[in-house]
């Protein structure tokens, strides 16, 4: 072929019809072979052409409905997002957007060291809102069952 142009629509449909008919004739041959083997008592060998007769229609329909062949010139292109450049503040914008200083939990080991608990926090052996029981009973109440 001189150009890389696609086949015409009618030529593409004719190609897919021809491929479908070939696959279905192979299916028919598999079915006939499976029946002959079954009649002659071939046992498990009957399953090989029977499986072919069952599976081939699926692929024949997928190939026939596949549509026009994709243009092979481009291939797969990786996704390249069109994102803006990352903002990095320089000395002129530092006064507008000052950096936050680390708080007590962000610096060091993460413990305040005072042993006190803030609102909504529980210390060792304490129960919070919605929790019942004592430490170690895993949420079971003190009632006997």
Image (cartoon, rainbow, N blue to C red):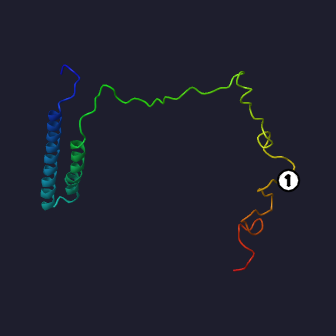
Residue 122 at x, y percent in the picture: 78, 58
Quadrant of the rendering where the N terminus is positioned: top left
Which residue is outermost to the front? 96
Q: Quadrant of residue 42?
A: bottom left
Residue 44 at x, y percent in the picture: 23, 58
Residue drawn at 73 percent across, 78 percent down: 143
Residue 70 at x, y percent in the picture: 28, 32
Viewer-proximal residue among 41 and 32: 32
Q: Is residue 98 above or below residue 27?
A: above
Viewer-proximal residue among 42 and 34: 34
Q: Is residue 32 above or below residue 9?
A: below
10 Å crowding of disc 1: few (<14), some (14-19), many (20+): few
Quadrant of the rendering where the C terminus is positioned: bottom right
Residue drawn at 28 percent across, 29 percent down: 71
Viewer-proximal residue among 76 and 119: 119
Residue drawn at 16 percent across, 36 percent down: 15
Residue 47 at x, y percent in the picture: 22, 56
Which residue is outermost to the right? 114
Q: Quadrant of residue 141?
A: bottom right
Taking 124 as reference, is 41 left or right? Answer: left
Give the secondary structure at mark 1: loop
Taking 19 as reference, is 107 left or right? Answer: right
Q: Is residue 49 above or below residue 136?
A: above
**Which residue in the structure is indicated by mark 1?**
116
Which residue is outermost to the bottom? 145
Taking 35 as reference, is 62 left or right? Answer: right
């Amino acid at each position: 072929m001189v150009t890389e142009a696609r086949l015409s629509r009618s030529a593409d449909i004719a190609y897919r019809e021809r491929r479908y008919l070939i696959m279905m004739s192979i299916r028919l041959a598999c079915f006939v072979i499976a029946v002959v083997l079954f009649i002659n008592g071939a046992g498990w060998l009957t399953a090989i052409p029977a499986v072919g007769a069952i599976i081939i229609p699926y692929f024949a329909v997928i190939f026939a409905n596949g549509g026009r062949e994709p243009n092979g010139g481009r291939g797969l292109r990786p996704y390249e997002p069109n994102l803006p450049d990352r903002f990095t503040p320089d000395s002129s914008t530092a006064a507008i957007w000052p950096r936050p200083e680390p708080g007590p939990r962000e610096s060091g080991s993460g413990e305040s060291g005072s042993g006190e608990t803030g609102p909504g926090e529980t210390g060792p052996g304490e129960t919070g809102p919605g929790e019942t029981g004592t430490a170690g009973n895993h949420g079971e109440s003190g009632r006997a069952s």
